[in-house]
Image: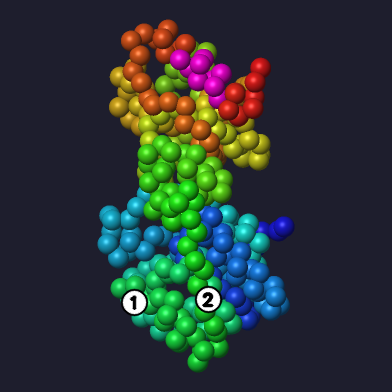
Amino acid sequence: MSAGLVIEGLQAIEPAPSVVSIGFFDGVHRGHQSIIRRAVHSARAQALRSVVVTFDRHPMEVVNPGSQPKLLMTLARRARTLAEQDVDLVVVLPFDDDVRHWSADAFIDNVLVGPLQARQVVVGSNFRFGHKAAGDLTTLRELGPERGFTAEGVALLEVDGAVVSSTEVRSAVDAGEVELAARMLGRPHLVDGVVVRGDQRGAGLGYPTANVQVSRRVAVPARGIYAGAFHAPDGHEHPCVTSVGVNPTFGGQQLRIEAHLLDFSGDLYGDLAAIDFRHRLRTEERFDTVEALVRQIGADVAEARRLLGRLE
């Protein structure tokens, strides 16, 4: 399976008859995947191009600045993940003040009809678009035939009795319920960042850590200790124990994400990296002594090995 082409804006699109799915697709969760999978299947059945249209920023960042949620993915990660859904093309559309004011009709004409030559549009049943979110699936079905396309809505997916949505995934991440988030996403929640120098206290305790600096706009799990994997730039995944917190035993105040890689030694400073969160081990605690903290870290590592299948 090869990844589709990712392009920014409408100008670089080569017109061709297409089946199009549209959405912000934050997290590219299992519900999003079902929409895109339906579009890809339909495109192949009709020998058409499959296209995903997404946006470079959350619409609320433009409509009501400051009200936008923390994001489950960086734009680069989201575009790459969408391209891996077996689509032919991913279009990242800048959501600026002009796009914000497009009517539903204008959005259809400017995006779907012109450059994409849509023959079919596949969206989630709750999809909204256009100025003040005036357009929906009914709008697409009413206006589509005269513009040469049909519209199909995909029912919302449920996991554990709840509808899967980016909002629900964010809530699970915010609560530290990373196993639930993974079930909704179809994979562990992951954050991207850069390895920077921290206090280098972990090495002195016998458990060196990679301090990963992530964007404040990205959703990170609740403060606590987690088992997961560190994704290196070379593609290797290293089992790790990750602390999300402020190091209260040492009087810290700044939130940090610090990963201790199991059975690894090497210099990671400056590397682009990502950390995924597979299991929550415990809440963050303040210990009365450094010795008590070290004993607990040892227990955390042992439990992570058990959960991740890396037993000594």
x and y percentages locating residue 238 in the rendered image: 62, 31
> Does residue 180 show up?
yes
Q: Amino acid at mark 1?
A: Ala
The residue that appears at 60% across and 70% down in the rendered structure is 39
The boundaries of the magenta stretch are 296-304
x and y percentages locating residue 66 in the rendered image: 27, 55
x and y percentages locating residue 214 in the rendered image: 44, 40
**In the current view of this chain or complex, which residue is farthest to the bottom?**
146
Task: Find disc 2 in the rendering and name its residue.
Answer: 152
The numbered dot on residue 21 is none
> SS at mark 1?
loop
Task: Find disc 1 in the rendering and name its residue.
Answer: 134
The residue that appears at 53% across and 76% down in the rendered structure is 152
Instruction: Using the image as rendered, state which of residue 308 and residue 118 is in the foreground.
Output: 308
x and y percentages locating residue 96 in the rendered image: 37, 68
> Does residue 27 show up?
no
Relative height, residue 130 to residue 145 (above, below): above
The C terminus lies in which quarter of the figure?
A: top right
